[in-house]
Image: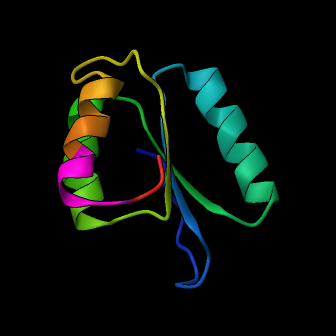
Amino acid sequence: MTELPIDENTPRILIVEDEPKLGQLLIDYLRAASYAPTLISHGDQVLPYVRQTPPDLILLDLMLPGTDGLTLCREIRRFSDIPI
């Protein structure tokens, strides 16, 4: 998981992507646009993170190691209305 300290008013975006180059590219673009991105590369780490630290938006890959993106989307919808 990649994360930097942020101001509490900065929109937080969770990137769930197992391809390192694509994940880093998204982080770079989002930071340049003054967002606070966090990268998680394994599906099994997503639900605990979202429950503990709900982001403002989730960018979710469908094919992930561990739990797949579609299953994660369904599970997140059971307890949250975070845009995915």
The percent coordinates of residue 7 (x first, y second) are 58, 82
At x 72%, y 52%, the residue is: 30
Q: Quadrant of the N terminus?
A: top left
The quarter of the displayed image where residue 65 is located: top left
Where is residue 28? Give x, y as percent. 74, 45
Determine the main secondary structure of the stretch shown in magenta.
helix
Instruction: Please check the rendered image and state whether residue 20 is part of the magenta-colored stretch, yes or no.
Output: no
* Vertical order, 64 against 30 (above or below): above
Residue that appears at 66% across and 45% down: 27
Q: How is the image coloured?
A: rainbow
Say which of 67 and 7 sits in front: 67
Residue 30 located left or right of residue 69: right
Which residue: 81% across, 57% down?
32
Could you tell whether 36 is left or right of 76 in the image? right
Looking at the image, which residue is at 59% across and 70% down?
11
Q: Check if residue 77 falls in the magenta segment.
A: yes
Span of residues in magenta: 76-81
Say if 73 sits above or below 6 in the image. Answer: above
Q: Nearer the viewer, residue 12 or 82?
A: 82
